[in-house]
Amino acid sequence: MSLAGRGVHRVPHVRLSARMALNPFAAPSPRPSRDRSPLIDRDSRSVAVGYWFGVVLFHRLPRSVWRYRWELSPLVVALAPVSVLSSWWGLLLGVPLGVLAARLWLNSAAREDHAAYRALCRFRDSWPDHAEALGLSVTDSRDRVLTPRIVESENLGGGSFRWLLDLPRGLTVEDLDRRREELAVAYRASSLMAERDPRRAHMASLTVTGQNDPLYLDPLSADPILCMPAGQPSDTRIVLGYTSTREPVTLPLFEKGYLVAGAPGAGKSGGLANILACAALMRDVELWLIDAKNGAEQARWSPCAKRFATTPAEAREMLSDLVVIMDERYEVLRASGASKITPGADTPLIFIIVDEVSRITGSGGAEAKEANRLLRELVQVGRAAGLILAICSQKIDATTLDTNIRDNMAFRLAYRCGTEAQAITVLGDEAVRNLGADAHKLGDTAGVGYLVGEEGGKAVRLRSYWLDDDVRQEIADRAYAWRLEHQPELLGGYLPLSPSESVSGALDALETFDALTTCAAHRLDPDAGKDCAACRAMWNEHTSAAFRNAWGAAS
């Protein structure tokens, strides 16, 4: 007999809540009664079955068929004649389908894309096993083994791909980076790089470069540099090279500094030539060149330069003059109330190239210390005044270059280095040990190196575009012709030594050159001013001694 039959009324179960604990006079809230009705009634079940049948028929099945369209296309081609022989409807449907299937199957590019997609699917399926075998897994409270989850996939071509990983609690990007060599072996890849998402610590980008790495194949054409017209604005980005995904690597020029180093034959001269070529094609940019190889490397660029030094003594004199110019510009900034200059015709950027700096600063003695001091002052203070340095050397260590100079360089580019210590000297300990910039492990392919800079705070593996001597000379002549016609004040009189060859395209603006080297009385007829003292003084002022001798011999 129930309690209700004995006159006892059932009281709903009361749960003591936090509200009652604070206020005992609060009304209790009864527990909601359980609904014993089925979760889905018969009509709802019918709707659910119809929904999933539609999903399978119209979504998953076509998706699977499309995924294997290349394997099924020969079957369609084989069934097309059967359809043609059966009826007219077969003729109308079979022939177009057969032609379309044959066309798709014969498209090699599409089949390669499909093969890359299938390979990416295989890599995704094998990722949990590889991650668990290499210790990239954690166990949660329910004894479940968790590995980094692939959120997004991107096919980069050439057997390379990029994943966006969601890391479980207990794993970091450093764990992935420590296992990158083992992962590269597991995937039979050329290299592997893990990068942390700057906004989310639990997200990481994993880039796997396949065996057909573009950096180690035939070099790509340097079209981004060759197609750059002369007279570009000074804020145009410098084109340096390309990455494993064939994406160009570009860098800014204003308020930045460049440090380029590498072993002999590693390709540092090619990288410096790309930087110099892009800078020479910009307007409002003065070039000050220091070539410690007695001018052999940068001679072709000397016509575009304001100053050109080939000996350590000339280099120290040039650096001293630059410090004076820097102080004068800061006086102008203080008088105007500005914090930094705005590049223009009146205050152009001064881009200083120092090639083989070890011959200037590594000889020891008071002169080398003075050169180091001048370089350090320009690097630390010269940015706001519009003075930018690019320093290049085969070997950079504490004896050849002050570490303060290296640390103040915005971009550091290291090609193949002989030892790990040399790579650390150029790129820094953080880049080599934690960012994967193993410049000492690079192969013998010239032009491949690591770039570490302010933008993104990561190490980028790249290959510099290659410009041969003829192409460099053509760019130098084109840049010189534009400067001679539009901004002759950027030139220092270092004209080409072979007027009949090198100046073939550069002296199209000869009228501007005559205007610089003749007085007002003989400007309309420069030949009449040969005996004029004023014309002779202007000629000596705007031309170098080497050019005057060569031009006189050629004339």
Image (cartoon, grey):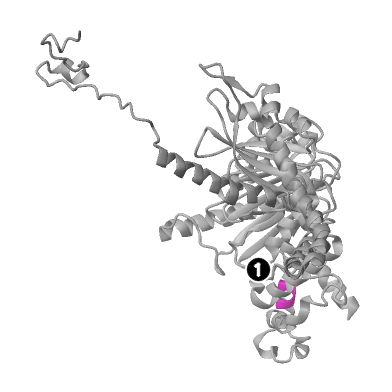
Q: SS at mark 1? A: helix
The residue indicated by pointer 1 is 490
- Residue 341 x/y as whole percent: 50, 59
Is 438 colored magenta in this rendering?
no
Which sits in the foreground, 156 or 55? 55
Asked whether the viewer can see residue 313, the reply is: no
Provide the residue span drawn in magenta.
Answer: 538-542
* Magenta part, dominant SS: helix
Which sits in the foreground, 170 or 394? 170
Q: Which of the 4 quarters of the picture holds residue 415?
A: top right
Residue at x 30% of width, y 24% of height: 34
Residue at x 80% of width, y 42% of height: 394
Q: Quadrant of the C terminus?
A: bottom right
Vertical position of residue 54 compared to residue 549: above or below: above
- Residue 89 x/y as whole percent: 72, 68
- Residue 515 x/y as whole percent: 68, 83
Residue at x 84% of width, y 39% of height: 443
Vertical position of residue 88 compared to residue 341: above or below: below
Q: Amino acid at mark 1?
A: Leu
